[in-house]
Amino acid sequence: MTTYDDRASLTDLTATVERVRDSVEGVIEGKPEVVRLALTVLLAEGHLLIEDVPGVGKTMLAKTLARSIDCSVRRIQFTPDLLPSDITGVSIWDQQRRDFEFKPGAIFAQIVIGDEINRASPKTQSALLESMEERQVTIDGQTYELPSPFMVVATQNPVEMEGTYPLPEAQRDRFMARVSVGYPSVEAELQMLDVHGGVSPLEDLQPVAHAHEIVKLIEAVRGVHVSEPVRRYAVELVAATRTHPDLRLGASPRATLHLLRAAKASAALAGREYALPDDVQALAAAVLAHRLLPTAQAQLNRRTAEQVVLEILQRTPVPAAPGQQHGLGGLGRNIPAYPQQPPRSL
């Protein structure tokens, strides 16, 4: 594997990410934390699920992120009559060649936008399982590799809305993080009227980063150091979801891996070569909550999965730096680096 100089990689990452962030925030007004999470998932080689009510900019966020990067983009409008072959592709008999010819589906792109994914049946949703986990598609016994980078950005409406299906647990577990865009502030909405009132800003949006740059940044993020106490802290958080009395389904080992990768990407975005417990804490709700299933009693008590994750964060001791005492978890704690110098280069 090609190695990169530590400082040069982090400098390049910061500069590239800033360009992409500015491009996305120029269209998505007043949501910097949502944009940062989307970039974190991209650099962590994950997939993003955007869930919210209609009209708040879910699809706009996905399209803006895709267009800000010079790579192949395909959009899939999920509907009840969508077939799995529409996503993965199909083998068609060629009369002239007298042989089957494979016609790739919409999944063969570097960024795939799945619009309103929960309006398709679970059978169609399952067509994404192999591609999201293994980054490949198997059709008629033949395996086809997907391009790199590869990211699925899916939007969905709340399950209670008309014509929607709950995402299967296996499908939700393959999304690294879930985010809600939410309603904009008054100032952001006024600015949106000025920017979006006449023409769509997507029409003039130009790519600010190339696909090969993103691949290099992903390789740099893989080299971010995570110390043993921080790894153990992530494992303890995930393990606590499996024994919590308000949950009937806890987070999987895949969730632990996603949490670790997201923490590494978050550290790199902050210009650090090592991850902190703060990185794990800040991402725990976004990475874990959508995988959890509350018990019937918890639902009667209006306890959400996000509330359970925040409770676990408060109860799980945070690993202290050498020479410091352990304490209770709290978002935004100022904890020294683990360690001050990473043992290997990016």
Image (cartoon, helix red, strand yellow):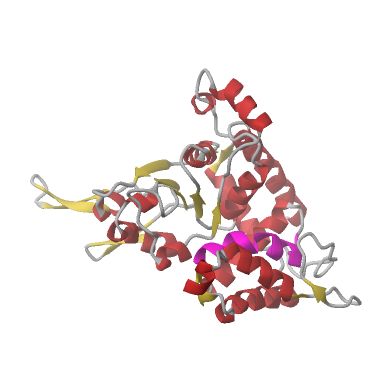
Residue segment shown in magenta: 273-291
Q: In this rendering, does residue 27 appear at all?
A: yes
- Identify the image quadrant of residue 285: bottom right
Q: Quadrant of the N terminus?
A: bottom right
Using the image, determine if residue 15 lies above or below residue 150. Answer: above
Residue at image coords 41%, 53%: 160
- Identify the image quadrant of residue 167: bottom left
- Front residue of 165 and 204: 165
User: Farthest residue in the top direction?
Assistant: 198
Residue at image coords 51%, 28%: 202
Residue at image coords 90%, 75%: 324
Using the image, determine if residue 272 lies above or below residue 251. Answer: above
Q: How many marks?
A: 0
Q: Is residue 147 left or right of residue 45?
A: left
User: Farthest residue in the front direction?
Assistant: 300
Using the image, determine if residue 229 lies above or below residue 21. Answer: below
Residue 244 drawn at (x, y percent) = 59, 78
Residue 232 drawn at (x, y percent) = 69, 78
Residue 99 drawn at (x, y percent) = 12, 53
Residue at image coords 70%, 46%: 12
